């Protein structure tokens, strides 16, 4: 089990650290101050879901000997305060670096849905995944 520590240093800002390895990330709060330069908690949660889904695809790709190196995920999220403050939508666009057969695409997209983090969200939070392949229009898949 990894250990993560967050230290509040002032004015809605902190430093997150992961042990072992001493990796750090600056975290800020933009909910009452507008845009910030550091990652917000929402950024990290949305990026965490994107990473989990991408790595789930990676496990399947390795099993099937498919090369997904270079895949990029565009991550967007929105927050609402109705009926209570929460992430409303996490929208992910998986930009696949190469074409795959229809069967391979289906296998990879289903693998994305196996991300265990997705099960941690309340039903009010929508997670939407779109897959883009070279030379083809986007395919929209609702992942949660």
Image: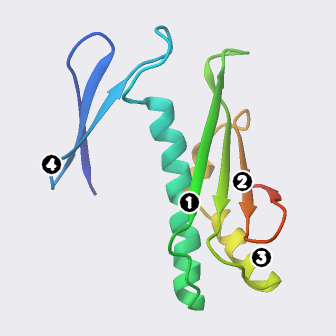
Horizontal side of 103 relative to 62 (left or right) equals: right
| Callout 2 secondary element | strand
Which residue is tagged 4? 22
Q: Sequence-wise, which precedes: disc 4 or disc 3?
A: 4
Query: Are dots 4 and 1 in contact, CB under 8 Å?
Result: no
Distance between mark 4 and mark 3 Cα atoms: 38 Å
Mark 4 nearby-residue class (10 Å; few <14, some 14–19, many ≥20): few
Residue at image location 50% in from the left, 13% down from the top: 34
Distance between mark 2 and mark 3 Cα atoms: 13 Å
**Residue 72, horizontal then vertical, whole percent:** 56, 60
| Callout 3 secondary element | helix
Which residue is tagged 1? 72
Q: Sequence-wise, which precedes: disc 2 or disc 4?
A: 4
Q: Sequence-wise, which precedes: disc 1 or disc 2?
A: 1
**Residue 8, horizontal then vertical, whole percent:** 23, 20
Quadrant location, the N terminus: bottom left
The residue positioned farthest toward the front in the image shown: 135
**Residue 7, horizontal then vertical, whole percent:** 21, 26
| Callout 4 secondary element | loop
Distance between mark 4 and mark 1 Cα atoms: 26 Å
Horizontal side of 97 relative to 24 (left or right) equals: right
Distance between mark 1 and mark 3 Cα atoms: 18 Å
Which residue is tagged 2? 129
Which residue is tagged 3? 106
**Residue 92, horizontal then vertical, whole percent:** 66, 49
Mark 2 nearby-residue class (10 Å; few <14, some 14–19, many ≥20): many
Q: Is residue 18 above or below residue 104?
A: above
């Amino acid at each position: 089990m990894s250990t993560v520590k967050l230290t509040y240093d002032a004015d809605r800002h902190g430093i997150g650290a992961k042990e072992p390895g001493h990796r750090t990330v600056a975290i800020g709060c933009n909910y009452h101050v507008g845009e910030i330069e550091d990652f917000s908690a929402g950024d990290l949660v949305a990026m965490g879901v994107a990473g989990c889904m991408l790595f789930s695809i990676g496990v399947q790709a390795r099993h099937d000997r498919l090369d997904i190196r270079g895949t990029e995920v565009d991550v967007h999220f929105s927050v609402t305060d109705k009926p209570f403050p929460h992430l409303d939508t996490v929208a992910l666009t998986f930009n696949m670096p190469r074409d795959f057969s229809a069967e391979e695409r289906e296998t990879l997209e289903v693998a994305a849905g196996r991300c265990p983090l997705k099960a941690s969200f309340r039903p009010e939070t929508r997670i939407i995944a779109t897959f883009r392949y070279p030379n083809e229009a986007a395919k929209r898949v609702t992942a949660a």
